[in-house]
Amino acid sequence: MATIRDIAKEAGISAGAVSRILNQDESLSVSKETKERVLAIATRVGYTKPIHSAQAKKAAFTMGIVQWFSAEEELTDTYYLAARQGVEDFCGKNNIAITRLFPSDNDPAEVLKDINGLVCIGKFSDKEIRRFIQICPNTVFLDMPVDKYPITSITMDFDQAVRDALHYLEKLGHKRIAYLGGLEYVGNHEAINDYRKRQYLHYMKRHNLDSESWLVEGSFTSASGYEMMKELLKKKDRPTAVFAASDAIAFGAMRAISEAGLSIPNDISVIGFNDVEACKYTTPALTSIHAPSYDMGAHGANLVYVSSNLQIHTPLKVKIPCELMKRESCGEVKSV
């Protein structure tokens, strides 16, 4: 079993610092990047905090956490990392033991055999959803609406978030608004419906705006955002604004715009999604939709815990509101 010293060696910091990070010592002065790196390593190597005998007697509840993203993927897109931290922090504060299921684990039923509740973070195939519900009926799915089954799910209110972003751009005079998104698959190449894309198409149609010319999809990475934006800039009439389905995509798009000798926002306005910390430090600072994934994780863990304690079986379908964080990357249309 991995130890704190193993994590410290890989992270390149002292064992004491790792211990304080894992114990959520707020007095420790350490960068957010270092903390996230330590937590990601701890998750990947399967580190479990030792429980003393007295604590073990108190920990009467075990929470299973199923992660769609690997630890390495979490570091490139911290949306799911924050969601997992929300779950784990709730468990830590309530003396709840944790059992983790990683994407590479081959026998979910064996790994999760002793859990009292389950939080599934990310996107899953229909087959996987049925299997997790069979393993533990007291299950909550985070970031994926599960409408076919009587099970609780918590998602972001993508519809309202996208409407807010597009309405803001339209008020600034934009009509040629591009959408840069990502294609994702689960199970046996089962495509995932992106509610951001759906709402974009719906909004543009309802407002008599062209969407077919401006919709491009790749992956949820900065590299893909860069290539998608370069593709759009080859068009005779370029868009005056871009809505990116993630901040990572937006970062890549911003670089492509700058390399083309264009100005943000004078030539093209840009909006991202997630509102990661780096949005405040881009040039210009990136307007983005704040998606509180940490809170989503904490709410999910709480619902699983409460449902078990009170024997509540009625499922909930929860949507968490998002907020448009207006910064310098958006401006009024200068020319059309």
Image (spheres, rainbow, N blue to C red):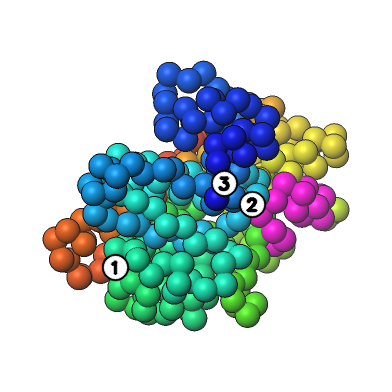
Q: Which segment is the magenta one?
A: 216-233
Q: Which residue: 46% across, 47% down?
A: 48
- Looking at the rendered structure, the kind of residue marked 3 is Ala
**In x, y percent, where is residue 232?**
78, 54
Left/right placement of residue 327 relative to residue 84 reads right
Residue 247 seen in render: no
| Disc 2 target residue | 73
Q: Secondary structure at mark 1?
A: loop
Left/right placement of residue 116 relative to residue 282 reads left
Name the quadrant containing residue 260.
Answer: top right
Give the camera-side residue of 87 and 245.
Answer: 87
User: Along the polypeptide, which appears first: circle 3 or circle 2?
Assistant: 3
**In x, y percent, where is residue 106?**
57, 72
Is residue 114 located in the magenta-colored stretch of the structure?
A: no
Magenta span: predominant SS is helix
| Disc 3 target residue | 2
| Disc 1 target residue | 138
Q: Which residue: 70% across, 51% down?
A: 221
- Looking at the rendered structure, the kind of residue marked 2 is Glu
Q: Which residue: 48% across, 44% down?
A: 82
Mark 2 burial class by Cα count in 10 Å: few <14, some 14-19, many 20+:
few
Q: Is residue 313 above or below residue 58?
A: below
Q: CA distance from mark 3 to mark 2?
A: 20 Å
Label count reads 3
- Looking at the rendered structure, the kind of residue marked 1 is Asn
**In x, y percent, where is residue 77?**
61, 47
Q: Are marks 2 and 1 in contact (CB under 8 Å)?
A: no
Q: Secondary structure at mark 2?
A: helix
Q: Which residue: 49% across, 81% down?
A: 127
Mark 3 burial class by Cα count in 10 Å: few <14, some 14-19, many 20+:
few
In the rendered view of the protein, which quadrant contains the C terminus? Answer: top right
